[in-house]
Amino acid sequence: MKNRAALFLLLTATCWGQVDVTQYPTTVHVSSSHWVVEQTSIGPRGYQKLNVIIDRKKLECKAEVPSGRPTLMALGEYRAKLVEDVHKHSYESIQTYEFRLADNVTRRFTVTGQSE
């Protein structure tokens, strides 16, 4: 009985904090992360910009950062899901991905650029 309880605790600890791949099926590789401040009509706004690779496509993503000190996302692999995918014409699109971070926090990034 003690062995079963120990095995259960070990499996629970191992699985704790892991992302459910079915909920976040896309792998995102963040290759660069930087902080940008843009002047808008209501004042300066801080954004986090990422260069990422999603499905072998090089993309730039952007997310507004709440007020406070700027932070940079660590480079590496993240799990994500596509939460907005609008194609009004065959030559343009709007896409937003929700990234799942290691501590189960989510952050939404809109695709703002692409390159070959």
Image: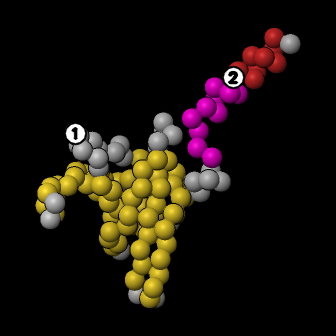
Residue 62 in magenta stretch: no
Segment colored magenta: 11-20
In percent of the image, x 29 and y 47: which residue is there?
Answer: 66
Residue beneath the point at 32% across and 60% down:
62
Q: Mark 1 points at which residue?
A: 69
Asked if residue 103 lies left or right of residue 61, the reply is right
Residue at disc 2, secondary structure: helix
Q: Quadrant of the C terminus?
A: bottom left
21 and 104: which is toward the camera: 104
Closer to the chain start, of discs 2 and 1, is 2
The image quarter containing residue 44 is bottom left
Horizontal placement of 36 versus 14: left or right?
left
- Is residue 59 in view from this perspective? no
Residue drawn at x 51%, y 40% is 104
Disc 2: which residue: 10
Looking at the image, the residue that sits furthest to the top is: 2
Q: In the rendered view, tell whether residue 40 sits above or below residue 64.
A: below
